[in-house]
Amino acid sequence: MKTRFILIQTSHAGNVGAAARAMKVMGFDDLVLVAPRWPDVLQREETIQRASGAEDILSRARVVPTLDEALDGMTHLCATAMTPRDFGPPLKAPRPHFAELAQDPSQAVAFLFGSERFGMHNDDVYRCHTCLSIPTNPAFGSLNLGAAIQVIAYEWRQALGGFALQSATAPVRPADAQQVAGMLGHWERALVDIGFLDPAAPKKLMPRLNQLFNRADLTQEEIHILRGVAKAMIETAARASR
């Protein structure tokens, strides 16, 4: 779904970079700045540093003098504000509103963020269809601009289906029954050698260990570790008996 993030009269260059980074990690790339404090904000060192790899978002971003120019092609406008405005659009939390909004792929959605000091002007809020407010601690609800953009970008991406979780670990190789049985035989010998298991009266020790390891769902790597422990026990017992 077409999505645009619009920053109005942003005063800190670092927040522009943070916005670009927040957008990129959630797969969005349409950033428009309305009358920022610094006309060259997209090229400033602090902006680029805070973007931290999202320079491509900055290179595509536009700087425009008025909000009208930033809203071209947008059909659903979401203001962001901590408090509702009299006669303004309905105040909604992002998650439930996004769940409804995502059902209409024909929409072109714009998220509007005001300046760090004053937020959005009333006239800009009145133009919007919805006023988003992130539920926060009632005693301290102030969010940094970059943090607010990250929350909105995340919630919107989740409403659109999200991204699949990518595992950072290698696939687990489960141990098969033969490997578990071989390891148990190794352990049985080790337990006998250290005097823990009496082969003349084994009772139910080995079946219980078998069930314990079954519940653990051992991997092949863990079998190697347990065999290493058994080997060390056998070698230690042999040295002690000399």
Image (cartoon, grey):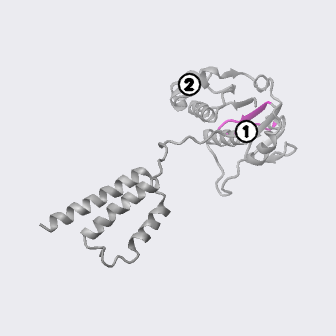
- Most extreme residue toward the right is 87
Q: Is residue 140 magenta?
A: no
Graded by Cα atoms within 10 Å as few (under 14), some (14 to 19) or many (20 or more), the crowding at tag 2 reads many
- Where the N terminus falls, by quadrant? top right
Cα gap from disc 2 to disc 1, whole angstroms: 24 Å
Which amino acid, by three-letter code, is at mark 2?
Answer: Glu
Which amino acid, by three-letter code, is at mark 1?
Answer: Leu
Graded by Cα atoms within 10 Å as few (under 14), some (14 to 19) or many (20 or more), the crowding at tag 1 reads some
Segment colored magenta: 108-122
Task: Pinpoint residue 220: horizontal percent, then vertical percent.
Answer: 42, 50
Tell which of 69 and 5 is nearer to you: 5
Placement of 108 over or under 143, stated as above or below? above
State the mark number for residue 232.
Answer: none
Placement of 234 over or under 15, stated as above or below? below
Q: Which residue is mark 1?
A: 160
Task: Pinpoint residue 86: horizontal percent, then vertical percent.
Answer: 85, 46
Q: Are dots 2 and 1 in contact, CB under 8 Å?
A: no
- Where the C terminus falls, by quadrant? bottom left
Residue displayed at 78% across by 44% down: 99
Residue displayed at 75% across by 29% down: 2
Q: Nearer the viewer, mark 2 or mark 1?
A: 1
Placement of 154 over or under 7, stated as above or below? below
Query: SS of the residue at dot 2?
Result: helix
Quarter of the rendering containing residue 77: top right
Residue displayed at 29% across by 73% down: 196
Task: Pinpoint residue 3: horizontal percent, then vertical percent.
Answer: 73, 31
Q: Which residue is mark 2?
A: 55
